[in-house]
Image (cartoon, rainbow, N blue to C red):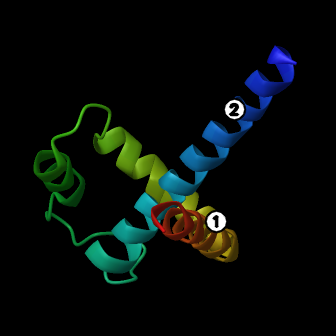
Amino acid sequence: MNVRAGNAAKGAVNQLMTLRNWAIGYYIVEYEQGGRDRAEYGSNLMENLEKSINDKGMNVTLFKACRQFYQTYPQIRSTVSNEFGVLVDSQKSSTV
């Protein structure tokens, strides 16, 4: 029983981290880069994001990996929409 619960928890964390990383990549490409493949030369986009977020683990290396992940798997959008919809629905029901 504990092994199954542990495996389920690991799976849930893995899924959420995947969705988080895709969402970070989406934000970088679509909002910060205006949908372009790369940031403007000399803009120091990733470095500026790291400074503005200032959170442990959020760094240039992660941002570059997330951007690449989003660009490689743009079709995850439907999964992200479904997952965030479920999270929003569950938050609404828990507050009522």
Provide the secondary structure element on which disc 1 rests.
Answer: helix
Q: Position of residue 63 (x, y in %)?
A: 36, 50
Position of 70 relative to 75 (above/below): above
Q: Is residue 33 visible?
A: no
Query: What amino acid type should be assigned to the residue bearing mark 1?
Result: Glu
Label 2 crowding class (10 Å Cα cut-off): few <14, some 14-19, many 20+?
few
Considering depth in this image, is 19 or 64 the residue closer to the camera?
Answer: 19
Q: Residue furthest front?
A: 96
Q: Position of residue 66 (x, y in %)?
A: 47, 53
Query: What amino acid type should be assigned to the residue bearing mark 2?
Result: Ala
Position of 47 relative to 75 (above/below): above
Q: Which residue is mark 2?
A: 9
Sequence-wise first label, 2 or 1: 2
Q: Quadrant of the N terminus?
A: top right
Q: Which residue is mark 1?
A: 83
Left or right placement of residue 88 versus residue 54 in this view: right
Provide the secondary structure element on which disc 2 rests.
Answer: helix
